[in-house]
């Protein structure tokens, strides 16, 4: 009888451990930390010779080199996205375009999102959804945020930020 009781207790403990392990799988144990990313830092990944950004109007900014020559354009969702929340906080984006105003890169700026989720979106090429498109065409394209399982909230927030700034860009062209 004692042996059966010990066996039942052991079985119960093993079942609790297995259930607990299955329940916690897929959940990030990372604590959100502010990841600081400057716009110029992102711009330099596309245009290494960029030295500054000059305001053209409320939405558009010119990217210039050391000779003050135009090398591209950029847009930031920061002034338009204060109410767009990701999993932990706001998720502003920067959009880098060439001289013909074709999107070269979309990236998240300083944020509090869980690093592994943002990395997952990068690995899955989520930020590339708008590359090669002009702002008006990019507005028509909707990234399927649900297909980025595990980072869906962040993906939806980034998509909303992209949409917000592209709308402003198209209106102010």
Image (cartoon, grey):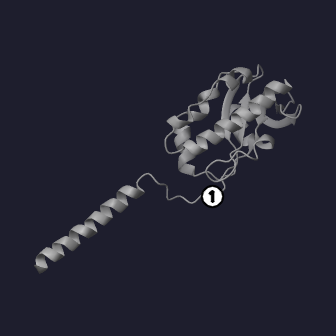
In the rendered structure, the answer to whether residue 8 lies left or right of residue 40 reads left
Residue 42: name its quadrant.
Answer: top right
Q: Which residue is mark 1?
A: 33
Residue at 55% x, 42% y is 152
Quadrant location of the C terminus in the rendered image: top right
Residue 86 screen position, x and y as percent: 64, 47
Residue at 77% x, 32% y is 74
Residue at 57% x, 50% y is 115
In the displayed structure, 110 sits above or below 134; it is below
In the rendered structure, the answer to whether residue 85 lies left or right of residue 116 reads right
- Disc count in the image? 1
In the rendered structure, the answer to whether residue 125 lies left or right of residue 103 reads left
Residue 60 screen position, x and y as percent: 83, 31
Residue 121 screen position, x and y as percent: 55, 40
Residue 133 screen position, x and y as percent: 67, 21
On the question of residue 44 being in view, the answer is no
Residue 46: name its quadrant.
Answer: top right
In the displayed structure, 15 sits above or below 107; it is below
Q: Which of the pair 111/143 is nearer the observer?
A: 143
């Amino acid at each position: 009888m004692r042996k059966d009781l010990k066996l039942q207790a052991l079985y119960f403990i093993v079942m609790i451990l297995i259930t607990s392990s299955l329940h916690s799988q897929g959940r990030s144990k990372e604590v959100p930390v502010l990841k600081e990313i400057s716009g110029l830092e992102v711009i330099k990944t596309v245009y290494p010779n960029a030295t500054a950004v000059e305001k053209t109007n409320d939405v558009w900014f010119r990217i210039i080199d050391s000779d003050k020559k135009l090398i591209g354009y950029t847009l930031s969702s920061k002034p338009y996205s204060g109410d767009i929340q990701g999993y932990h906080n706001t998720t502003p984006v920067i959009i880098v375009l060439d001289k013909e105003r074709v999107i070269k890169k979309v990236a998240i700026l300083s944020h509090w999102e869980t690093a592994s989720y943002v990395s997952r979106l990068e690995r899955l090429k989520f930020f590339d959804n708008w590359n090669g498109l002009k702002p008006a065409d990019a507005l028509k394209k909707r990234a399927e945020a649900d297909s980025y399982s595990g980072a869906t909230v962040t993906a939806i927030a980034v998509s909303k930020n992209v949409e917000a700034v592209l709308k402003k860009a198209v209106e102010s062209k």
